[in-house]
Amino acid sequence: MSPRLSATWTRWAALGISAAIVFLIAMAGRSGWRALHSARSLHPTNARDSVANAYTDRFGDGTPDFLRLSDPADQAAFRRWFTLIAEYQAIRPAAELPAEITDCASLLRYAYREALKRHDENWFVTSGMEIAAPPGEIHAWSYPHSPLGAALFRVTPGPATAQDLQHGAFAQFADAKTLVERNAYLVSRDVRQAQPGDLLFYRQFGQSSPWHSMIVDRIGGETLVVYNTGEDHGTKGEMRRVTLGELLDHPQPQWRPLSGNPNFLGVYRWNILRGNQ
């Protein structure tokens, strides 16, 4: 073969190899796109079936494990957002308080839901909150992007099962009694065991709405408690932020968080924070 023919053959061979490589890459990309498109086009029932196959509740408390925040960093982020959001409602002008916050349970629902959201610029605009140094984000999941969608609170008894996805075991609304019985667990009746983001629950016998809740917070070395008083004989409820010391010296003994107080149910913690136990 002459040098000229040899060079020409080499160029054509190189072009052929390049064309083959481009063709293979294109086919691989096309196959990948088809696979991605196929996964995205799954029927909702198939998606639910996939979730159902991995539906577990290792504590049997009604909260599926995919909601639990197993990473300590996620738990810390949730606690910080939850307490910041609750406390902000106590210091903002009453006229700016979200309309949905009318009692103690609605404060818990609001702060819980908002803590689990993504806190982007739109969130700050919508919430009207101003935070100088926002905490880090929760990485495990964000509301409402979970298999349960907007239904965030457990409202039926029993452990979590795959059938919960169809049987309305979760809802956007839960009263104080449901929050303490289905969505949180008892830590202690010793208030000294409370951590920021924990809950104090009471049952005031003889009242039309006997279940009450408060949120524990801490600034520096001082423990604070945030709550909404709820409507009282037609008077609109108010946001309150008091020190734990003030609550322990409350003029009405039934509101003191003491183990000897039969109205004080104890310190409770959200089920989703059970993740690394």
Image (cartoon, rainbow, N blue to C red):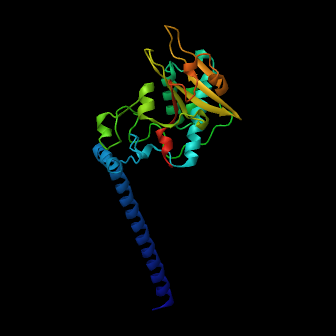
Residue depicted at x 37% and y 48%: 56
- Quarter residue 210 falls in: top left
Residues 169 and 13: in front is 169
Is the residue 22 above or below the residue 112 in the image? Answer: below
Is the residue 39 above or below the residue 221 in the image? Answer: below
Is the residue 209 above or below the residue 257 in the image? Answer: above
Can residue 222 be seen? yes
Q: How many dots with numbers?
A: 0
Q: Which residue is outermost to the top?
A: 234
Residue 9 spot, x, y in % from top left: 45, 83
Residues 172 and 202: in front is 202
Is the residue 29 above or below the residue 37 in the image? Answer: below
Residue 35 spot, x, y in % from top left: 35, 56
Residue 224 spot, x, y in % from top left: 64, 28
Residue depicted at x 53% and y 46%: 139
Q: Which residue is outermost to the bottom?
A: 1
Can residue 137 be seen? no
Residue 105 spot, x, y in % from top left: 48, 24
- Quarter residue 216 falls in: top right
Q: Which residue is outermost to the right?
A: 220
User: In what quadrant of the picture does the N terminus appear?
Assistant: bottom left
Residue depicted at x 63% and y 17%: 93
